[in-house]
Amino acid sequence: MLNYNAEPQRNRHSTWISLAVVAAILVAGVLLLAAFRNASRDSHFTVSSPGPREVSQAVSTIAAHAQSGALTMPTSDDRPSIRPVDPKRTDWVITKDYAGHGGPGPYGAVDYAYYHDKDACGSALVATHPGVVKTLLNDPVYGNLVYVVGKNYSTTYGHMQKIAVKDGQSVASGDVIGQMGTTGNSTGCHVDYQVWLCKGDPTKSGTTERVCVNKNPLDFAK
Ligand SMILES: [Zn+2]
């Protein structure tokens, strides 16, 4: 009788222990994965997708080059003032808005495409402000991407079919930087466009570390 009662209790007890062990293994696995992700992001920013950390690093890299005299940062007003799509076309559409990308928050973007996808792939993409170019090729998320780094503002243009500019090249607002495409994790021809405000003038400060904050592109050109 005693044994008969004791047996189910032991079973219940060991069931709880098993559940606790499984939970602990799951938690440890998640922590390990997170640590691995961070480690690979730290050492390879050139193959990472844009995020607050990656944009800050790209801008810091440009700043270091500017301070060493390897390139010249445009000094004109660098606030983005136009859309990234072909200025001669009026049939552009926003296919995913800022909130749809998670903004406002640490990250956000706006996707531009064209009505009925008409001649979208291959259409011109332009810099929305003056800056220096840094390219990112074959990113798993953004495919071919161009950073335009200004003294205050930086912008990114993702999923490009073709890039028409080189690392370190200065561009003015409206200059063609490449063609709209669907490279990386993308289901159709569009540009993923991001605006970042980075603290400090990278050409003047003694430090090259820059911290960039994501902004809503539609606050600059609707
Ligand atoms: Zn997007």
Image (cartoon, rainbow, N blue to C red):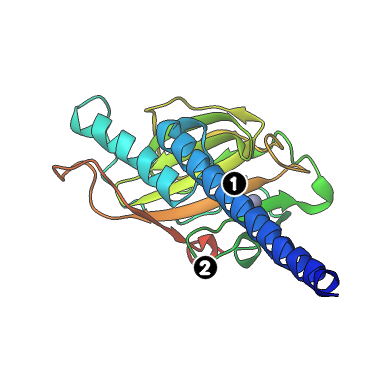
Which residue type does callout 1 highlight? Gly
Asked if residue 127 is positioned above or below residue 95 in the image, the reply reads above
The N terminus lies in quadrant: bottom right
- Other-residue count near label 2 (Cα within 10 Å), few / some / many at <14 / 14–19 / ≥20: some
Which residue is disc 2 drawn over?
Answer: 104
Quadrant in the picture for the C terminus: bottom right
Say which amino acid is labelled 2.
Pro
- Vertical order, 90 against 33 (above or below): below
| Disc nearer the start of the sequence (2/1) | 1
Q: Residue most toward the left? A: 206
Q: Is residue 213 above or below residue 123?
A: below
Q: Residue at x 41, y 32 (%)?
A: 43
For label 1, the SS is helix
Taking the spot 81% from the left edge, 46% from the top edge, the residue there is 117
Q: Give the foreground label among 2 and 1.
A: 1
Q: Mark 2: which secondary structure?
A: loop
> Residue drawn at (25%, 24%), measured in percent from left and top?
70
Answer yes or no: do the residues labelled 2 and 1 have beta carbons within 8 Å?
no
Residue 24 picture location, percent across and down: 59, 55
Q: Is residue 106 left or right of residue 1?
A: left
Q: Which residue is mark 1?
A: 29
Label 1: few (<14), some (14–19) or many (≥20) C-alpha neighbours in 10 Å: few
Q: Is residue 203 visible?
A: yes
**Image spot of residue 19 (x, y percent):** 69, 60
Mark 2 CB lies closer than 8 A to ligand 1: no
On screen, residue 185 versus residue 1, left or right, reads: left
Q: Is residue 79 visible?
A: no
Which residue is nearer to you in this view: 206 or 171?
206
Which residue is at 67% across, 36% downward? Answer: 184
